[in-house]
Image (tube, rainbow, N blue to C red):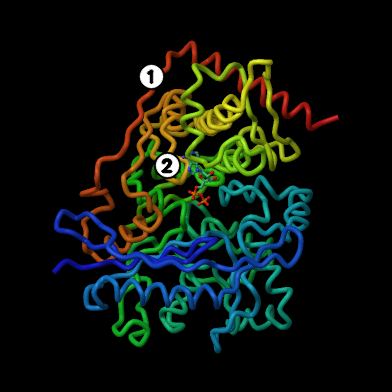
Amino acid sequence: MTTCILAIDQGTTSTRAIAFELRDDGGLHPVAISQIALQQHFPASGWVEHDADEIWTATLQTCREVIAKAGGIGRFSAVGITNQRETAVIWDAATGEPLHHAIVWQDRRTADVTDRLKAEGHETAVQSATGLILDPYFSATKFAWLLDAVPGARERADRREVLLGTIETWLIWKLTGGAAHVTDATNASRTSLMDLKDRVWRDDLCALFRVPRGALPDIRECAGELGQTEAGLFGRALQITGSAGDQQAALVGHGALKAGDAKITYGTGAFLVANVGPAPVASTSRLLGTLGYAVDGEAAYALEGSIFSAGSAIQWLRDGVGMIADSRGSEALAQGLKDNGGVYLVPGFTGLGAPWWEPEARGAIIGLTRDSTPAHFVRAGLEALAYQTRDLLDALAADGAPRLGVLKVDGGVTANAFAMQFVADICDVTVERPAFQEMTALGAARLAAYGAGLIDDLKPRGDEAPAVWTPRMDAGERERLLGGWRRAVRAAIVAAHD
Ligand code: ADP
């Protein structure tokens, strides 16, 4: 009888559990899934909160459901966790009760703190220690806000009566009945408190961000014993042996294990994570330096960059201006044109990220003629995915990252073959989309299987063949199109300023 790994994927909008069967070929195959949507709380403009207890209850329920669906607890041998990153939880060590709603990664309430730290000139030092720019996105300022907001929490944190953690820490603490207060190094690398190279909390950063070291969890590697679930929860104790933040788990899920391997997830936005090898690479393009994963005392570091509007440009074409009835229809419309007709859509709906960093920029459509049709708008929206990806890859190259091998892709937009071929053409790189799309949960399961000693390495095995797109555009055409894109971006930036 084959054994199963229980993967918990605690995301921003839902909590999921997936049972993966470990087959004789060393491959992990999904056999059961359960999912519960997560309520979003918006108590003020720019504030986003989750109820940590709701997350815990949903985790228990989805786990129990997949254990039952997969044939009972006797089939399971390990648990892996992956989670929305940077989200900050505070709870009472004695009662296990959250002391406040969790502050979600998107939350901007601490922008005044990071603005002040920037004005005081701390950014260079923080970036060189942690790889991260100063931004309310990361957990440290959220932890400090929670400690200030909950009466008495600061004093109680000093006595370890109040604990802090990101979502995987909270879940491991609950699953182990309070026995383990731990984080994995990928999640720790998103706090602004961890030394990226040595993978330890830094006292100077704890002081700068006003987060008491004693309230923070112990930093562990991504695979190995993290704790044991309380026997009463699932009928038998299970070892928790894998943990990584969602983007990093996806890197492992894709098997992007070598320097130069990269993955990009094309959803509403797009997240690029590129493996840069065993030492951190300092970015001068404002990409984020982060940890890919750490196992057996070895680390793979990564650079990360994001595109704010990817699939959301397609959503806008559908829901905002009604040019397509459904997202899928975009492919045929774009394919139906012989070229883009000189039309470029810059999807700066919420500003432009790397390498432009123009938060005030807004969207633009450039190059319209009397021949332009809705199909040109749609094609331009899809093409923009590729141009923005190319901009990120250029930023990676400028930072001295290892030469890109294959670009592994996942997410809703990758259903669009036109867009994926255009990414291959514009980025001049081979694009691979795995048949199984749940890369995040798969990565957590693979780390857990490795941490439990059930597999010998993290390499993918037994997966179905991926869809592959290879570049076939000639260099002259690529440069011509990129020239048009860059002019369009400059126009969008000029339009945003006096
Ligand atoms: P998220 O996890 O961010 O919600 P998903 O990975 O579910 O995103 O992807 C959803 C996005 O993919 C939506 O923005 C949608 O417009 C886009 N999308 C879905 N199918 C297609 C398609 N065939 N062509 C282009 N975009 C698509």
Residue at 54% in and 40% down: 282
Secondary element under disc 2, as helix, strand or loop, is strand
Q: What label sits on residue 472 in the rendered view? A: 1
Vertical position of residue 420 compared to residue 465: above or below:
above
User: Residue 289: image x %, image y %?
Assistant: 53, 45
What residue is pinned by disc 2? 263
Residue at 33% in and 43% down: 434
User: Residue 97: image x %, image y %?
Assistant: 57, 84
Q: Nearer the viewer, mark 1 or mark 2?
A: 1
Q: How crowded is the residue under tag 1: few (<14 C-alpha within 10 Å), some, or many (20+)?
A: some
Q: Quadrant of residue 428?
A: top left
Amino acid carrying mark 1 in the image: Arg
Q: Quadrant of residue 140?
A: bottom right
User: Residue 468: image x %, image y %?
Assistant: 32, 33
In the image, taking residue 91 as reference, residue 260 lies left or right, namely left
Amino acid carrying mark 2 in the image: Lys
Secondary element under disc 1, as helix, strand or loop, is loop
> Which residue occupies the extreme top position in the image?
476
Closer to the chain start, of discs 1 and 2, is: 2
In the image, taking residue 126 as reference, residue 425 lies left or right, namely left
Q: CA distance from mark 1 to mark 2?
A: 21 Å
Q: What label sits on residue 137 in the rendered view? A: none
